[in-house]
Image (tube, rainbow, N blue to C red):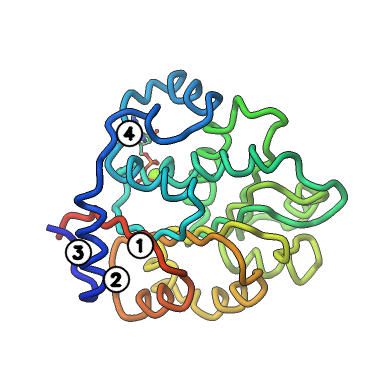
Amino acid sequence: MTQPVTSTDKAATQAVATATTHSDFTQLGLIPELLETLKLLSYATPTPIQSHMIPAVIAGKDVLGGAKTGSGKTAAFALPIIQKLAKAGPRKAGSQSVSCLVLVPTRELAQQVSDSFMRYSQLIKPNLKTLAVYGGVSTNAQMQSLRGGADIVVATPGRLIDLISSNAIKLDKTQTLVLDEADRMLSLGFTEELNELLAKLPKAKQTLLFSATFPEEVRELTSSLLNDPVEVQLQEQE
Ligand code: ADP
Ligand code: MG
């Protein structure tokens, strides 16, 4: 059973559920470098969330994803984002800007997700610069790494705000935003930080939001942030 949200959400969910499910990575519009990487990693077939989400992200759509850990969600957003960045070509030198920002609730998740981006972008030339930014460790090393900006920054909200305050990072050129585990981010008390960060991002951007559950607070965030999103609700009811 799919997770009930609102009636309009339900209609969109059904539309997604009846859409063609591709059973082969070669049908999703991925570039040869990424198909090669998937072979290296022995990923034989896409998971359902990957087959729905990858073409939508490549098409530039906002996405709302309801999926639990282990569904292949990270690959579902990382692969098409890497493709988008690879196609856009090298970053402009000498800026502190970040092309893609991924916000996550915990340090562990920041490390995991940035590791995934690095693993999936290993054959992309020139290399994409991916950084994990989180609290509990010295800011100095993170400030050093951020010099010249980055293609992908995976961050927890508090430390990111600190780094923005010290001008170590700028969000005004960010084209892609991912909110991973949005429900956990809000329940851990990051609402204010999140709003502060969202206000610093450009209005025109592609946003992907993932959550395992959809309480009122998440639905509010979703409706204020996402523009005509494709919904992928693959969560089994607990
Ligand atoms: P989630 O973010 O939902 O936890 P991940 O994308 O991190 O999912 O994937 C969970 C695990 O499954 C990881 O170890 C990842 O390497 C592996 N994985 C993801 N997609 C595939 C696939 N299509 N085929 C095989 N393994 C996969
Ligand atoms: Mg994961």
Residues at marks 4 and 3, CA–CA distance in whole angstroms: 22 Å
Give the mark nearest the N terminus, 4 or 1: 4
Residue that mark 2 sits on: 214
Determine whether the residue tagged by mark 4 lies in a helix, strand or loop: loop
Q: CA distance from mark 2 to mark 1?
A: 7 Å
Check disc 3 and report its element: helix, strand or loop: loop
Kindly report the distance in space between the C-alpha atoms of the residues bearing marks 4 and 1. 20 Å
Q: Residues within 10 Å of mark 4 (few under 14, many from 20)?
A: many
Q: Which mark is residue 3?
A: 3
Location of mark 4 (residue): 46
Between 86 and 185, the one nearer to me in the picture: 86
Disc 2 marks which amino acid?
Phe
Which residue type does callout 1 highlight?
Ser
Left/right of residue 113 with respect to residue 213 in the rendered view: right
Q: Is 24 drawn above or below residue 53 in the view shown? A: above
Residue at 25% across / 48% down in the picture? 19
Look at label 3 and name its amino acid. Gln
- For disc 1, the marked residue is 211
Q: CA distance from mark 3 to mark 1?
A: 11 Å
Q: Answer above or below: position of 164 versus 43.
A: below
The residue lying toward the viewer, choosing from 192 and 11, is 11
